[in-house]
Image (cartoon, grey):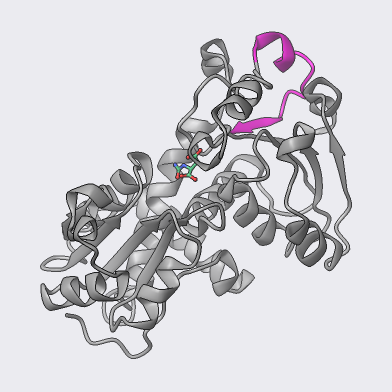
Amino acid sequence: MRKLKHLRHLMSPLDFTVEELDKLMDLAVAMQNDPEKYAHVCDGMRIATLFYEPSTRTRLSFESAMLNMGGNVIGFHSAESSSVAKGESVADTIRVVISLHADIAAMRHPKEGAPMVAAAHSTIPVINAGDGGHQHPTQTLGDLLTIRSLKGRMDNLTVGLCGDLKFGRTVHSLIEALVRYPGIRFVLISPEELRIPSYVKEDVLDRNHIPYEEVIRLEEAIPKLDILYMTRVQKERFFNEDDYVRMKDFYILDAAKMELAGEDMQVMHPLPRVNEIAVEVDNDPRAAYFRQMEYGMYMRMALIYTLLELGEESTC
Ligand code: NCD
C-alpha cells in the first residue's frame, strides 16, 4: 500500500475546489495528449473496483484508467458475486481489499452514503462511483471536462437537464458542480412525477441564487440551450413497474427535435442510453455522448493520479 501524506476520498464533486477541478482537467488533457508519459506511473499499484450494483461504463472506465497508467485491477461487479451475498459489511470489504494490497478503491452501491461508510474505515482513498439516487462525482468530473473542451468555457451557459431528474444521480452531482461557475442557468425538463428533488432546489439552486425554469416539453426548451443533458429513466429505482412503463418513453430526442437546436448545442448523456436518444442522432456532430465517455476516462486517470499523490514525485 502506498504511503500518502494526506488521505483524501472523493464522495461529492464539492470535495474539490474550482481551482483543484481546473488542475484536474488540465492534467486529464495532458494525459490525453501524451499517454506515453503516464503509461507507467501506476506500475505495481492496484485499484479495487467494488461494484455492488451493475455497471459497465463506469467500472470499465476506472479499470481502463488504471490499466492506462500501468496499474492492475481487483474487484467484483455485482453484490451477488461477492461475499456481500453472505452478509459482509462495506466496512469489512474495504478492510479486506486493503489487506490484499489495494492502493485505491472505487465503490458503487445502491444505498446512499455507503461509500462514505467505507471511507470512514479506510486507510486508502475511496472514490464514490455512484451511491443510489444520490451522487455520481466521477461522472461529473468527465461531464465538466466535456463541457470545457466542447464549449471552451464553464461559465455563462444555459444547461438543459432532461428526463429522470428525481432519481438521476448524475444530474444531482452535475448541478452541484456547475452552480459554482458564474452565469449558469438551468432548464429542468421532466414529467411532473420525475422533477428534481426539493432538496436540490432549495439547498443548491435557491441557496446559490441560480436562475432555473421547470418545463415539461423538450421542444419548448431546446432552442435556448447551450447543452442538452439527456438521462435514462432509472428503472431500478422505481417502486412500481407500471409507473416506469408510463415514464420510460416520455422523451425521445430525434433528428426532427435536433433541428430546433442551435448549431453549437452539445448533446450529452451519461449512458447507458435506452430510448431517450434515437440512434439517428449519433451521426449529428452535436452528439457528444461517446466523446463524453472518453473524457470521463481521462478524468478518472487524473483523479487516481492525484489521490495517490503521484505528481509529487514524478511530474507536475
Ligand atoms: C449513470 C449512473 O450509473 O448513474 N451511468 C453511468 O455511470 N455511466 C446513468 C445511468 O445509469 O442512467
Residue at the limit of the structure toward the bottom, as seen here: 5
In the rendered image of this protein, does residue 4 appear above or below residue 268? below
Where is residue 146 shown, x and y percent of the image? 55, 44
Q: Is residue 85 left or right of residue 125?
A: left
The residue lying toward the viewer, choosing from 12 and 288, is: 12
Q: Percent position (x, y) of residue 252?
A: 65, 18
The residues colored magenta run 254-268
x, y percent for residue 295: 45, 45
The N terminus, quarter of image: bottom left
Query: What's the residue at 58%, 17% (across, down)?
Result: 284
What x and y, as percent, mark residue 210?
85, 58
The quadrant of the picture occupied by the C terminus is bottom left
Quarter of the view holding residue 251:
top right
Residue in the picture at 44% in, 48% down: 296
Q: Residue at x 80, y 57 (%)?
A: 201
* Residue 157 seen anywhere in this rendered image of the structure: yes
Q: How many tags in the picture?
A: 0
